[in-house]
Image (spheres, rainbow, N blue to C red):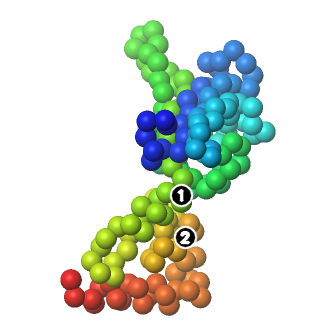
Amino acid sequence: VGSNPHVFGAAIALEVDHTDTAQGLAPYVYRQAGTLVRTDLADADAPYWQEPWFASIKELGRVTWVEPYFEPTGAKIEMTTFSAPLYRQATGGTKVFIGVATIDLRLTDLYEYLDDLSIDRKGFGFLLTSRGTLIGAPEGEVISAPIAEVLDSEDVSNWEAWLKDASTEPR
């Protein structure tokens, strides 16, 4: 975290069976007011192994981005997490799941990145998650909502105008 300004936080969260305590072990480092804060997600009110950034990775068995969410435990911000499963090799060569390694990105940092993109004269950048959550919007607007809700809202006329301008404006 300290060596990459784009990473907001990182954790290594172990499967409870691979720790010495019933609450598990999940050291987490994140940025706050220009310093790095260290905490243990095992001290949170909710068991970390039930959180999507842990549970879904354990179930999937592969690296993945987690849908944007509000992190209520330490950082208390909107973010998204890239999670990778951790394995050890057991006797006989089988893989045993032992935990998850994560990096967190603040959604506000993603909004700034998208807003800074230069795409023709009227183009704009946005991200769409695998579940259809829209991240970012034209003209620096901040949106993190299902695209169906965005396109169904009263403000859809703005999107129609932006998309029309972007597609008809000479390049």
Outermost residue, top side? 91
Residue lying at 45% horizontally and 44% vertically, measured from the top left: 5
Instruction: Kindly give the residue lying farthest to the front in the view shown.
Output: 34
Q: Bin the neighbour count of mark 2 within 10 Å (Cα to Cα): few under 14, some 14-19, many 20 and up.
A: some
Look at 27% across and 89% down and name the residue there: 169
The three-letter amino acid code for the residue at tag 2 is Val
SS class, disc 2: loop
Mark 2–mark 1 CB contact (< 8 Å): yes
Between disc 2 and disc 1, whose residue precedes?
1
Q: Mark 2 points at which residue?
A: 142
Q: Quadrant of residue 27?
A: top right
**Badge number at residue 107:** 1
User: Residue 167 appears at what percent x and percent y?
Assistant: 29, 85
As drawn, is 66 to the left or to the right of 163? right
Residue 95 sits above or below residue 4 on the image: above
Q: Is residue 166 above or below residue 132?
A: below
Distance CA(mark 2)–CA(mark 1): 9 Å
- Residue 36's spot in the image, x, y percent? 59, 36
Q: Is residue 58 visible?
A: no
Q: Nearer the viewer, residue 10 or 92?
A: 10
Q: Does the image show residue 27?
A: yes
Q: In this view, does 35 lie above or below 151?
A: above
Q: In this view, does 88 lie to the left or right of 40?
A: left
Residue 166 occupies quadrant: bottom left
Q: Which residue occupies the extreme left position in the image?
A: 171
User: Based on the displayed image, in which of its 4 quarters is residue 25 positioned?
Assistant: top right
Q: Which amino acid does label 1 sit on?
A: Leu
Residue 135, x across and y down, in percent: 49, 65
At x 46%, y 84%, the residue is 159
- Quick one: SS at disc 1? helix
Image x and y of residue 57, in percent: 52, 39
Which of 19 and 28 lies nearest the eye of the viewer? Answer: 28
